[in-house]
Amino acid sequence: MKKVLLKTSLGIAVAFASSHLLASGFALNEQSVSGMGTGFAGRSSSADDASTVYGNPAGMSRLKRQEVTVGGAAIFAKSDISGRGSNLGGETDGDMVPTVGVPMGYYVKPIDDHWAVGFGVYVPFGLVTDYGSGDAARYWGKKSHVEVVTFQPTISYAFNDKVSIGFGPTINRIKGELGSNIVNRFTPGRNDGEVKIKGDDTAVGYNIGILVQATDHTRLGLTYHSMVDYKLEGNTKVNSALIGPYSGSKFDAELKIKTPESVDFSVTHELDDQWTLYAGTTFTRWSRLKDITVDNEVPAALRAQFGTITEEQNWHDTWAGAVGASYKVNKQWTLRTGFSVDQSPTNNQDRSPRIPTGDRKIFSLGAGWSPNDDMTIDVAYSYLWEEDTKVNLASPTKGTYQAKYENSAHGVGASLTYRF
């Protein structure tokens, strides 16, 4: 994701984000299918299976046997786009988000009554959009394909039956590709050039959590996911007759960007032998993303156009809240539901077609089936809808782009937990 997007791509870096995945900004929520069923309301306090490695590493102390949880989620997004589009022509086609898969896998092993170790692999951030060569948004962000894969070795310690803590360093691998058209100033909309950016980086962060059994029926959980500081190094390839002999050349590029820290607090209350209630809130420090600055190593003749590129983003911090419930029908079946609200970090002035996201609401359903004591199969479904948002951008080199987005998405997930 060599964010070297020259003036042709709108806030490249910010393009990590996908308004069509089930979390704000470019964060993803799909790290647990059992949690997905309750709208992630009890993410840091439920500790239902090995996915607690992500939700709250302290929750590993509640798992008394070795567990493996593997699964995945799929996102089916839809955007209805209307408005003037671009003054340089092009379609306003809403089918720019293909079906997206989000895998996950976890392992937890209790050592004794106090210590447990675990490992997780999951995708905390991602983006896939493809507007196509004839779309009105092609000069501001034709294609984006970015993902972050995290590996997390984890350890937890239970002081007693009431309080436990957990910690895990995260090794985060980011890679991606971004593309945009370059306006042919002689015949705008025809014989356009194109810029493609590719790159990757690896950086380290950490997750830490505490779990408190406040009463016999109520647990409190608090999890901190750290900021991760990336230095993306890659190359930018420009194909355009406008740059003469440099067309088709690759130029080294560098972008520094930080994915934000977040704090998740939740409560799990066992109302009786059948009903469990969940509530939670998450704070994310998106205000770290003020602007995107990309440095390209280009010849002197191209430095004014493709040298240092800065684009304003001015994101703000966000809060998300969720409530949920589960009902244990019998020893084999558990039903779940949840509802969450999630703020968007973007603003009306700087919003991009790469991330045309607004505040959202999500309704979730889920079920867990345990045919025996060793195995549980979880499934979940979520429906997301956003408030209508507008993108209104203008540039001397890319023309104007004005559009209204009506976004929604369906998410489905399934996972298998095996205990031994």
Image: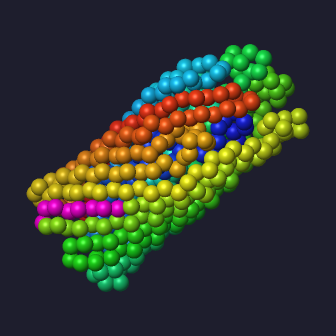
Q: Is residue 278 left or right of residue 401?
A: left
> Within the image, what quadrant is residue 202 found in?
bottom right
Residue at 56% from the left image edge and 45% from the top image edge? 347
Residue at 20% from the left image edge and 57% from the top image edge? 326
Query: 68 or 317, which is in the foreground?
Result: 317
Residue at 64% from the left image edge and 42% from the top image edge? 11
Residue 343 visible, this angle: yes
Residue at 67% from the left image edge and 32% from the top image edge? 394
Q: Is residue 194 left or right of residue 366?
A: right
Q: Is residue 302 left or right of residue 364?
A: right
Q: Does the magenta stretch include residue 274?
A: yes
Total label count?
A: 0
Q: Does the magenta stretch include residue 145?
A: no
Which quadrant: the N terminus?
Answer: top right
> Within the image, what quadrant is residue 409 found in?
top left
Q: Is residue 210 left or right of residue 303?
A: left
> Within the image, what quadrant is residue 398 found in?
top right
Which quadrant: the C terminus?
Answer: bottom left
Colouring of the image: rainbow
In the rendered image, residue 49, in percent from the top left (x then y), is placed at: 30, 61
Residue 171 visible, this angle: no
Most common secondary structure along the magenta stretch: strand
Q: Give the range drawn in magenta.
A: 273-280
Q: Which residue lies furthest to the left in this view?
A: 330
Q: Is residue 231 above or below residue 352?
A: below
